[in-house]
Image: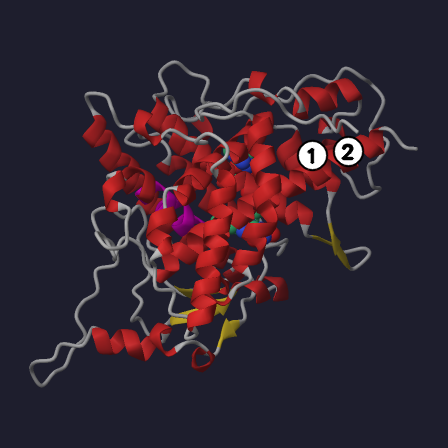
Amino acid sequence: KDYCKPYGQIRDTCCDYQSVESIQGDTFPKVEALVKSKFFKYYKLNLWRECPFWNDDGLCMNRDCSVETTDESLLPEEWRQEALGAIQMSPRGSAFQPFKVCTYKDQDFCVADDPTDKDVVYVNLLDNPERFTGYTGPSAANVWKAIYEENCFNIVHKMAEGCPTCSTPAVAAPASKSSSSAPFLSSSTTAGQLASIPSNKAQLSALLHTLADTPDDTDNDEVCLEKRVYYRLISGLHSSISIHICDEYFDRTTGKWGPNLECFVNRIGVHPERLQNIYFTYALVLRAVTKLDDYLAQYPFQTGDVAEDEHTRGLIHDLITSTKECPATFDENTMFKGADARSLYVEFRDHFRNVSRIMDCVGCEKCRLWGKLQTTGLGTALKVLFAYEDKSLSYPSNPNLLNHNEIVALFNTLNRLSESLEAIQKFRKMYYERLHPP
Ligand code: FAD
């Protein structure tokens, strides 16, 4: 059945929707298997760093907001805190102070947590899935507002007035062609939501089929490629988070978890540009992953088991090989080429670094975990694509290119995006079937 699959070119990439959906279909089970492996399921972070930009209002106290941490003694010795502490101890003098750890290099697009900080914990990602937590209201709105303001580079503005060269106001949803209300709305849907849910096939098609032709937030001649890419990346991440919320939604009336179609249509479906941006973000991250084939073939995963290390290497190679039949999804060589390339690059990097710091302002532990992980994942992709020449992407010439956390974050971010594309197909099918009941 045709569930109105999107077609055409994904803006600012080298590929079309069909190719991306085809790669996603082939690679999804492989990424899913990879993130369940020992190396990829543990992530190390500080969940309680103070918000550096404003006084936060305290953490969300819902049970679904909290994160279960992992007992370090269960982890391979090489990964543990005391191993890191030992490496960073000065061998001279009586004070034996740890060296001050610089948490980012010039090439980094993120400000990472200090790995020797006593508040740093390991988290098993499989035990703490990203899903609906109920985190909402001014705290969440402030974080998103601050993130989008970073998108505006050096232009001082107020969110309400829009951002003159980066993000124009949201594109209005296509006008309704039918006066009948959608047949699938639940009784809890509000009148406001009802008005914005399209209800016939023509509208569905306009929303989900003709993505390539829809105007989007960056349709403005003044917006250069680099700023468009920056905006799409942030918006794509936001779309992905929203899709996970809608896909694993907690229905308070039934007490059950499950996909919520109204949530998807309202947050994503009626904003085709948000859908476009998630395909864009996936294409960019996938390109970075494919460029790491040689580097990861020699990376020492140090899981404490040589056979497990080899298995991890095999899974990665298999995943990357299955993307190579398709042409590159994103061309990083078109970026940072003009007269102001260097200053634009520094601005781009510094603004992204700020977004990574804003994640410490997220007032819900679980959302903070996945927010920090995914900004680190996107920052790692940007570093791989833009901070190094191709010849430096090899383990023998640049063994410290990526640390444990960056690799875990990159592949888990790819998995999150991949799951979101999978969920989009599911929602498309649900939508179609609601409009065409048997
Ligand atoms: P929001 O999603 O808060 O969006 C705010 C505004 O941004 C919208 O009104 C719209 O103008 C604009 N916007 C929305 N989407 C896009 C897009 N894709 N592109 C461009 N502009 C857009 N909640 C959970 O339940 N689980 C989580 O795991 C979770 N993780 C989070 C992680 C982070 C980093 C943050 C900041 C919040 C997280 N939240 C999470 C909260 C969640 O993202 C929403 O803020 C909340 O559900 C309220 O949603 P909303 O409909 O008011 O709009």
User: Relative to residue 96, is residue 407 drawn left or right?
Assistant: right
Residue appearing at x 50%, y 56% in the figure: 315
Q: If the picture is divided into quarters, which one holds ligand 1?
A: top right
Residue behind mark 2: 431
**Closest to the observer, 138 or 214:** 214
Is most of the magenta stretch helix, strand or loop? helix
The amino acid on which the numbered mark 2 sits, given as a three-letter code, is Tyr
Residue appearing at x 35%, y 16% in the figure: 222
**Closest to the observer, 4 or 326:** 326
User: Relative to residue 368, is residue 293 drawn left or right?
Assistant: left
The amino acid on which the numbered mark 1 sits, given as a three-letter code, is Val
The boundaries of the magenta stretch are 374-383
Is 58 placed above or below 203 here? below
Residue behind mark 1: 265
Q: Is residue 116 visible?
A: yes
User: Relative to residue 108, is residue 165 drawn left or right?
Assistant: right
Mark 1 → mark 2, Cα distance in angstroms = 9 Å
Picture coordinates of residue 237, whole percent (x, y): 49, 41
Marked residue nearer the N-terminal end (1 or 2): 1
Instruction: Please give the count of numbered marks on the rendered protein.
Output: 2
Q: Is residue 370 magenta?
A: no
Q: Is residue 382 magenta?
A: yes
Is 392 placed above or below 429 here? below
